Image: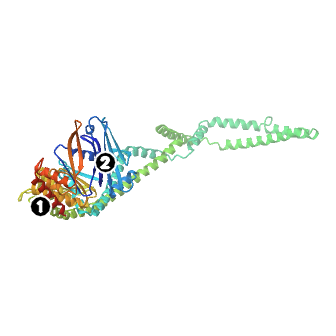
């Protein structure tokens, strides 16, 4: 909760250190004294928007620092998520507003972002102002209020878990279906490639082998003639193998007399043997040479078919095989995607049924809850002198959302016999203030935010209704810290902590001060609220009696 607020050079406030009580705190003062400036200051440390006009004239910056203690679990969680350390269960939030229009945020004296202030601030304080009735005027928030009243959010949490799973499935399906549409042209290309190459049954290395065979068949006669000529020369009695053998024998004979010729004889023997092998292999090649015209036509046709595919897909034969294998795998993946789409569609259908059933159970729970809520709020409104106002909760079925399958809107009937209508159409400012207070009283014990601020919640009310508002604020203050700006003595007397906001002139400049009032000070201020400046003794006595009476109430 808010322990202390320090303000420096904020509009008409030169310097102020304001302590707060843990229960009901009230601010009073004359109109224009600067009560709204305090709300601006608190909003600033909560990360809300600020303007340079808030800086006191003649100074380069305004500084607002708030000390918060007894941190809630929600605040601790946000601090942990942001990686911000805190000690002794307390933190300080600081906002400097610069005269040039900028601002600086600090948490525990360390520089932070304004968004971090705002995130933390949302767990520390909730402000309800004179013109801040969005909670009542915006139907989209009414369902949240009703759920908060119930306290047990297990059905909602269970439904939301299933709904998130349904959303995730739907997103995945959408992605796959979109990809499927975009891939149809790609798949057509891949199917054609697989058909073309698959029909050809191309083997690795076949292109080179086929080309070699084609060249042999194309030049077969010339090759055969060359082989025949070479073989004839080798077998020629005077120029071939016989001559080599005769030379070999001569060298062997000479080696008997001249050993140096032995090496030449051995080499000649090797030449003769190698030549005989060449002749033998050449003969085999010639015998095996197939110059069949039908085979040539077959090879030519296949060679042309492969060449056509290479031109079409702009690659060589080996790359063609690689593309074929990749295309087969890619098509299989598309097939898997189609199977996944079918599987996810079935899952989505089943999960949709589950989510729908959970939404119906949630709706039934809310219908029961609404009856209890209407009764409780009605009791609070009757206490606040609005017995004729009847609240109703109107549910409107709709599509499944994160919040269920319906919307809710609070309707009121201001007079007996009149049908309920939207709050925004018939509620006055004073009625809105009291209705808001009634809602806070009903759901306050379930609200995790430790500090509530009511800025002039007494607008449009007086007398007995104001007294009831004061009693209700004190009751809420028993559950959490309440800060209230008021003009009514009936509310001021109910406070445990009373702060006076005064405007005075110091050295020809207007300054606003904030003073914690003791008992005597409270008597004087309450008498002023009741009877104006310079209250009479009777008014002072009446104020004291009212204050003592209020202090004795629970």
* Residue 485 percent location from the top left of the image: 19, 50
Q: Residue furthest right?
A: 257
Q: Where's the C terminus, which quadrant?
A: bottom left
The mark that comes first in sequence, 1 or 2, is 2
Nearer-the-camera pick, 369 or 547: 547
* Residue 29 percent location from the top left of the image: 18, 47
* Residue 284 percent location from the top left of the image: 69, 44
Q: Residue furthest front?
A: 537
Question: In the shown orientation, is residue 348 left or right of residue 541?
Answer: right
Image height of 554 relative to 5, above or below: below
Residue 511 sits in quarter = top left
Tell me the SS state at disc 2. Answer: helix
Residue 32 sits in quarter = top left
Nearer-the-camera pick, 302 or 475: 475
Are dots 1 and 2 in contact, CB under 8 Å?
no
Question: In the shown orientation, is residue 241 left or right of residue 250?
Answer: left
Residue pointed to by mark 1: 382
Residue 289 sits in quarter = top right
Q: Residues within 10 Å of mark 1 (few under 14, many from 20)?
A: some
Image height of 495 relative to 209, above or below: below
Q: Which mark is residue 478?
A: none
* Residue 294 percent location from the top left of the image: 55, 42
Image height of 341 relative to 366, above or below: above
Q: How is the image coloured?
A: rainbow
Question: In the shown orientation, is residue 104 left or right of residue 472?
Answer: right
Residue pointed to by mark 2: 118
């Amino acid at each position: 909760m808010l322990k202390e607020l320090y303000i420096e050079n904020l509009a008409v406030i030169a310097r102020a250190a304001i302590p707060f009580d843990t229960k009901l705190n009230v601010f009073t003062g004359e109109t224009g004294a600067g009560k709204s400036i305090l709300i601006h200051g608190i909003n600033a440390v909560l990360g809300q928007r600020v303007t340079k006009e808030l800086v006191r004239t003649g100074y380069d910056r305004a500084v607002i620092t708030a000390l918060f203690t007894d941190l809630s679990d929600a605040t601790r969680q946000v601090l942990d998520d942001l990686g911000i350390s805190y000690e002794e269960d307390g933190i300080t939030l600081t906002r400097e507003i610069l005269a040039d229009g900028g601002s600086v945020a600090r948490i525990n004296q360390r520089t932070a972002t304004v968004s971090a202030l705002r995130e933390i601030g949302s767990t520390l304080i909730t402000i309800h102002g004179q013109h801040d009735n969005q909670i009542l005027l915006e139907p989209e928030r009414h369902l949240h209020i009703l759920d908060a009243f119930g306290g047990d959010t297990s059905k909602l949490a269970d439904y939301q878990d299933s709904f998130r799973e349904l959303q995730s499935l739907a997103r995945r399906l959408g992605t796959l279906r979109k990809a499927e549409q975009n891939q149809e042209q790609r798949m057509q290309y891949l199917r054609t490639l697989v058909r073309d190459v698959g029909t050809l049954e191309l083997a690795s290395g076949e292109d080179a082998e086929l080309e070699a065979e084609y060249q042999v068949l194309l030049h077969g006669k010339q090759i055969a003639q060359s082989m025949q000529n070479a073989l004839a020369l080798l077998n020629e009695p005077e120029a071939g193998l016989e001559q080599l053998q005769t030379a070999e024998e001569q060298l062997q004979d000479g080696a008997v007399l001249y050993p140096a010729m032995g090496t030449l004889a051995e080499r000649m023997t090797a030449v003769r043997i190698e030549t005989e092998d060449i002749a033998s292999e050449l003969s085999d090649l010639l015998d095996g040479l197939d110059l069949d015209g039908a085979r040539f036509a077959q090879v030519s046709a296949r060679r042309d078919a492969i060449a056509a595919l290479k031109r079409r897909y702009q690659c060589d034969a080996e790359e063609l095989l690689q593309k074929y294998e990749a295309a087969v795998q890619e098509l299989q993946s598309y097939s898997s995607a189609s199977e996944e789409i079918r599987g996810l569609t079935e899952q989505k259908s089943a999960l949709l049924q589950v989510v729908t059933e959970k939404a119906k159970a949630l709706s039934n729970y809310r219908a029961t809850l609404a009856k209890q809520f209407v009764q409780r709020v009605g009791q609070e409104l009757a206490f606040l002198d609005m017995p004729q106002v009847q609240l109703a909760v109107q549910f409107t079925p709709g599509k499944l959302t994160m919040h269920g399958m319906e919307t809710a809107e609070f309707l009121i009937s201001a007079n007996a016999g009149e049908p309920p209508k939207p709050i925004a159409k018939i509620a006055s400012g004073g009625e809105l203030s009291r209705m808001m207070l009634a809602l806070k009283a009903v759901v306050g014990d379930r609200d995790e935010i430790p500090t509530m601020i009511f800025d002039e919640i007494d607008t449009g009310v007086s007398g007995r209704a104001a007294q009831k508002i004061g009693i209700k604020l004190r009751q809420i203050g028993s559950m959490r810290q309440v800060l209230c700006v008021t003009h009514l003595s009936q509310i001021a007397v109910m406070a445990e902590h009373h702060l006076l906001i005064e405007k005075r002139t110091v050295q020809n400049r207007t300054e606003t001060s904030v003073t914690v009032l003791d008992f005597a000070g409270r008597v004087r201020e309450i008498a002023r609220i009741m009877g104006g400046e310079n209250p009479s003794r009777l008014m002072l006595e009446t104020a004291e009696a009212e204050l003592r009476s209020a202090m004795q109430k629970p």
